[in-house]
């Protein structure tokens, strides 16, 4: 799924509810030198990942989104408060295909007012419903994934995802 044109709308996931205007934030994991920005994506699943701060790693393997959570499944579910996915007009957003999630990540240096808000009671359910392959792992496995030459793909392929456990939105990472 490559995007040749800017989509009309983008999505921004957040555990924070009731945001009337998204303000650019300086905190960036992809490039601290970029300055304050609002991040968004054209993929609901990728936006859903950002409804929780408990995701240790995330990304795409062959265009299939995944999220890695390095805490016990039961603890995560007990503390999962959900959040919102904000639908944003794409005006003012730009995509740098050399950074972050590449063609799936858009940024704006200006504040953005959502045109619609979707509420989810569970970030985990939102991720799974939107096709994200979710993995609950031990901290030791997280270190192995971070050190793997293939971005952890071979390790994740051996694990059972939450999707497989539930029998919902199962995609094989490749």
Image (cartoon, rainbow, N blue to C red):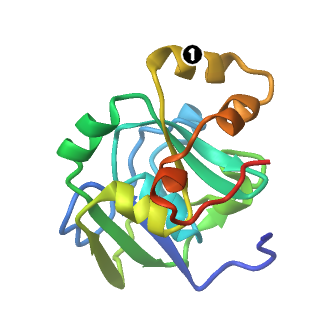
In the shown orientation, is residue 7 left or right of residue 56? Answer: right
Label 1 packing within 10 angstroms: few (<14), some (14-19), many (20+): few
Q: Dividing the picture into quarters, in which one does residue 27 lie?
A: top left
**Residue 173 drawn above or below residue 19:** above
Dot 1: element = helix
Q: Which residue is mark 1?
A: 143
Q: Check the picture and name the quadrant holding the N terminus.
A: bottom right
**Residue 47 drawn above or below residue 139:** below
**Residue 74 drawn above or below residue 167:** above
**Residue 42 drawn above or below residue 7:** above
In the shown orientation, is residue 62 left or right of residue 169? Answer: right
The structure residue drawn at horizontal position 33% and vertical position 48%, both measured from the top left corner, is 52
Residue 110 in view in this figure: no
Query: Residue 90 at x, y = what percent?
Result: 55, 78
Query: Residue 69 at x, y = what percent?
Result: 43, 36
Residue 134 in view in this figure: yes
Query: Residue 71 at x, y = what percent?
Result: 35, 29
Pick the front one: 109 or 96: 96
């Amino acid at each position: 799924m490559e995007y040749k044109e800017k989509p009309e709308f983008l999505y921004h996931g957040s555990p924070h509810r009731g945001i009337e205007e998204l303000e650019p934030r300086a905190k960036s994991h992809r490039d601290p030198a970029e300055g304050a920005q609002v991040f968004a994506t054209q993929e609901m699943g990728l936006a859903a990942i950002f409804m929780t701060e408990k995701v240790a790693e995330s990304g795409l393997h062959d265009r299939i989104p995944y999220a890695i959570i390095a805490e016990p499944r039961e603890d995560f579910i007990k503390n999962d408060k959900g959040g919102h996915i904000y639908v944003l007009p794409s005006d003012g957003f730009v995509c740098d295909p050399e950074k972050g999630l590449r063609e799936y990540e858009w940024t704006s240096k200006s504040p953005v007012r959502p045109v619609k808000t979707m509420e989810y009671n569970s970030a985990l359910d939102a991720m799974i419903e939107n096709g994200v392959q979710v993995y609950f792992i031990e901290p030791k496995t997280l270190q192995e994934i971070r050190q793997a030459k293939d971005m952890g793909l071979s390790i994740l392929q051996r694990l059972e995802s939450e999707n497989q456990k539930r029998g919902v939105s199962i995609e094989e990472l490749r």
